[in-house]
Image (cartoon, helix red, strand yellow):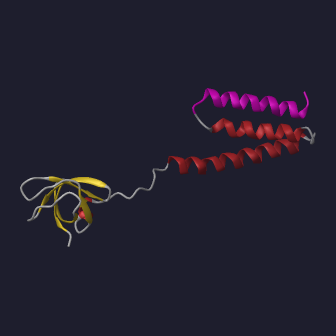
Amino acid sequence: MSEWQFWLVLGIIFVVLEILTPSFFFLWFGISAFISSILGTFITNKFITSTIFIILSALLWLFSKKIAKKWLEPKNTKLIHLDELVGKNGIALTDFDNENSGIVKVFSEEWKAYSEEEKINKGDKIIVLKRESNILIVKKQL
């Protein structure tokens, strides 16, 4: 068996192992073996092709850890602490007053709200005065 054939068979074995396992571990060794197979057609020294295989495998494996870490990290979405709503602006989605609740939108989130004093109409700009549990007390923005 020539040098390139050895690396080709080894690459196929690694790809089959990758298909049979639920990880990304063997894929990088398979790619490295295929590259070593291509280089094995030009280089007949087993030490050099083995060194290339080891270096490529290590680099691809390390690089894949960074990619996987980036993919697995949760997106850095800004979570709003509920008390940060006080003093923020929003818009009324329904009509409401201090006795009947309505819906307002603050930070692209919809909240149940009551007006502090006056009637608030749909489309009015509001400002959050306080938060009581999951209900906002708001007033019309001037």
Residue at (16, 56) in percent of width and height: 113
Q: Is residue 5 above or below residue 103?
A: above
What percent of the width, then of the height, locates residue 50?
A: 83, 41
Residue 76 magenta: no
Residue at (63, 47) in percent of width and height: 64
**Number of dots carrying numbers:** 0
What percent of the width, then of the height, locates residue 60?
A: 69, 46
The secondary structure making up most of the magenta span is: helix
In terms of depth relative to the viewer, which is nearer, 140 or 106? 140
Please give the range of residues in magenta. 1-22
Q: Quadrant of the N terminus?
A: top right
Report whether 31 appears left or right of 94.
Answer: right
Residue 13 magenta: yes
What percent of the width, then of the height, locates residue 68?
A: 57, 46
Report whether 90 appears left or right of 35.
Answer: left
The furthest residue to the bottom: 142
Quadrant hosting residue 107: bottom left
Quadrant hosting residue 38: top right
In terms of depth relative to the viewer, which is nearer, 120 or 82? 120
Q: Is residue 112 above or below residue 2?
A: below
In terms of depth relative to the viewer, which is nearer, 118 or 9? 118
Q: Quadrant of the C terminus?
A: bottom left
Report whether 128 appears left or right of 10.
Answer: left
Report whether 45 appears left or right of 108.
Answer: right
What percent of the width, then of the height, locates residue 46?
A: 88, 39
